Image (tube, helix red, strand yellow):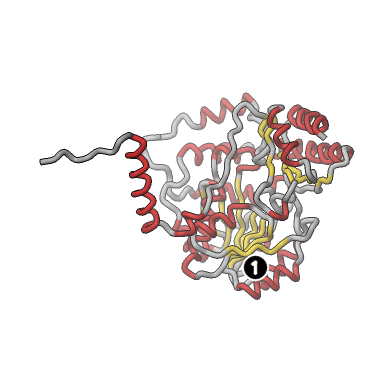
Amino acid sequence: MPARQLPASRNETMKDMDSIIRKLQGCLLRPELLQGTAYPVPQSEGLIKLDAMENPHDLPEALRWKWLDSLSGAMLNRYPDAHPDLLMDQLKLHGEIPPTMGLVLGNGSDELIQILITAVAGTGRPVLAAEPSFAMYSLLAGHLGLPFVGVPLDSDFRLDRTSFIKAMEQCNPSIVFLDWPNNPSGRLFPAEDLEAIVEAAPGLVVVDEAYHAFSRQTFAGHLGHHPNLLLLRTLSKEGLAGLRLGYLAGPRIWTEQLDKLRLPYNINILTQRSALFFLGHSEIFSQQADEIREQRDWLYGKMLDLGIKVWPSRTNFLLFHLPGKAAAVHSGLRERGILIKLFTDHPCLSDHLRVSVGTRQENGAFLAALESLL
């Protein structure tokens, strides 16, 4: 019996395997997934990290030890509470959510966006949002096989209410996402525009208040007054990004259905205990948010003094425009140990950069480095 002929090398074996896998993928995976991309997260080790809109402040040392003590009784050998009512009640108080509303908890708000789009994927109706806005709306719509319709903001990143409502009439979206304030501009659209959009929308409207800690405005009081309105929040921007806890609020008749798509035990026991502990010390994060807002306004003024086009913001970041220089400045900042966001794949954001507000020292270092590169 002749011996089976083996590939000439390990590399040839791997090429054969890759070819087989690609054929399988073509048969099994949705084209939208194969053609899509993952959400990009750049390496940041050793850099001053001003690219991801995080709270730059650490916990006070005394509070850190109390927090660790609160975790000591966590039973890691058991599954976490699948429906942590106490945590949800505290989140409602913290978020000014009417007590009659239901909540769905997510591993960050990203998971909740995924749940929402999954819930309506069978309709084939588009997902609609302002353009530009939070990238996960379009990314997840594409991965889940739904068209995404972006309604352009104007050249100053303002919302045109008439155009937005006309776009809804034309494409009949299943979900409208409104990030309020907007990411990446930092603008807070007029509340009356949101009210008009909710009234006119043919499907769900999700108001995403990720930056509520800095805008200090909320649409929560409208919950229950509109049958299609839901509110999305996260604790990430307040100073707890590492916990990955978001929540979706709305009438229980909605949250009970959406909760069916939430995987059981998606919020681990350490996150549950930590969130409960920190919600009992929310004044610390409120003080930090005050400091971040003060630093944001200081940084905004200093950047204007440098002659930079920078947008006023109601968030913890600033969007600015450096025509013909953005890529070089981004690279130069990185060489100096500072990481910010460069927009490379959006036609409305050519030569735009976004910087998160850091500590006083980090903001000073960024400003000095930026000035040296202009």
Residue 163, given in percent of the width and then of the height, sits at: 73, 69
Query: Which residue, as the protein is rendered here, is positioned at the far left?
Result: 1
Position of 34 with respect to 130 (left or right) is left
Position of 264 with respect to 67 (left or right) is left
Q: Quadrant of residue 328?
A: top right
- Residue in the image at 46% along x and 59% along y: 31
**Image quadrant containing the N terminus:** top left
Q: In this view of the protein, which residue sits in the foreground, 121 or 271?
A: 121
- Residue in the image at 78% along x and 47% along y: 313
What amino acid is found at the position of numbered circle 1 in the picture? His
Residue 78, given in percent of the width and then of the height, sits at: 37, 39
- Residue in the image at 64% along x and 52% along y: 134
Q: Is residue 284 visible?
A: no
Query: Which residue, as the protein is rendered here, is positioned at the far bottom?
Result: 169
Q: In this view of the protein, which residue sits in the foreground, 337 or 173?
A: 337
Position of 289 with respect to 251 (left or right) is right
Secondary structure category for the residue under label 1: loop
Q: Is residue 58 above or below residue 173?
A: above
Q: Is residue 107 above or below residue 180?
A: above
Residue 224, given in percent of the width and then of the height, sits at: 62, 65
**Image quadrant containing the C terminus:** top right
> Which residue is disc 1 drawn over?
225
Position of 34 with respect to 230 (left or right) is left
Q: In this view of the protein, which residue sits in the foreground, 334 or 94?
A: 334
Residue 373, given in percent of the width and then of the height, sits at: 80, 32
